[in-house]
């Protein structure tokens, strides 16, 4: 939520999804005050079609690994970052990747 303006400044649209249904997502946002006003689109992949298509389902838990995809305006995946369930992701690092992709500089 703190970096949402930084993503907007880069013309990036942030989407969040999981295999949880919309009721679980709503409860998650209500239980975490810092997420209540999170300005991102969320989607539910309850059948796991996207998760399975991307190959990011954790086999024993049956849920998606934590994954970040950077997709360009032509719908081409430019960057993939996948971690195990117990490892978080860094929005600041995703901004660094966006900067590199948009400026063609590391």
Image: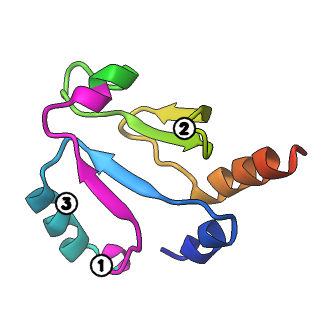
Distance, label 2 to label 3, CA atoms, is: 26 Å
Q: Nearer the viewer, residue 103 or 27?
A: 103
Mark 2 nearby-residue class (10 Å; few <14, some 14–19, many ≥20):
few
Q: How is the image coloured?
A: rainbow
Q: Residue 47 colored magenta?
A: yes
Quick check: marks 2 and 3 in contact, CB under 8 Å? no
Identify residue for label 2.
75
Distance, label 1 to label 3, CA atoms, is: 11 Å
Residue 50 as seen in the image, left or right of residue 80: left
The residue at the far right in this view is 105
Q: Where does the image place residue 10, in percent across and percent down from the top left?
A: 69, 64
Mark 2 lies on a secondary structure that is loop
Which badge, 1 or 2, comes first in the chain's sequence? 1
Distance, label 1 to label 2, CA atoms, is: 29 Å
Q: Which of 3 and 78 is in front in this view?
A: 78
Identify residue for label 1.
36
Image quarter (top left, top right, bottom left or bottom right) of the C terminus: top right
Q: Where does the image place residue 44, in percent across and percent down from the top left?
A: 21, 48
| Residue numbers of the magenta segment | 34-51
The residue at the far left in this view is 23
Q: Which of 76 and 36 is in front in this view?
A: 76
Identify residue for label 3.
25
């Amino acid at each position: 939520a703190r970096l949402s303006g930084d993503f907007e400044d880069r013309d990036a649209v942030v989407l969040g999804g999981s295999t949880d249904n919309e009721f679980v997502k709503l409860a998650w946002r209500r239980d975490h005050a810092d997420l209540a006003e999170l300005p991102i689109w969320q989607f539910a992949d309850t059948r796991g079609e996207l998760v399975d298509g991307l190959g990011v389902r954790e086999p024993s838990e049956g849920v998606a690994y934590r994954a970040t995809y950077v997709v360009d305006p032509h719908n081409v995946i430019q960057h993939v970052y996948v971690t195990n369930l117990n490892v978080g992701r860094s929005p600041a690092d995703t901004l660094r990747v966006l900067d590199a992709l948009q400026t063609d500089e590391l």
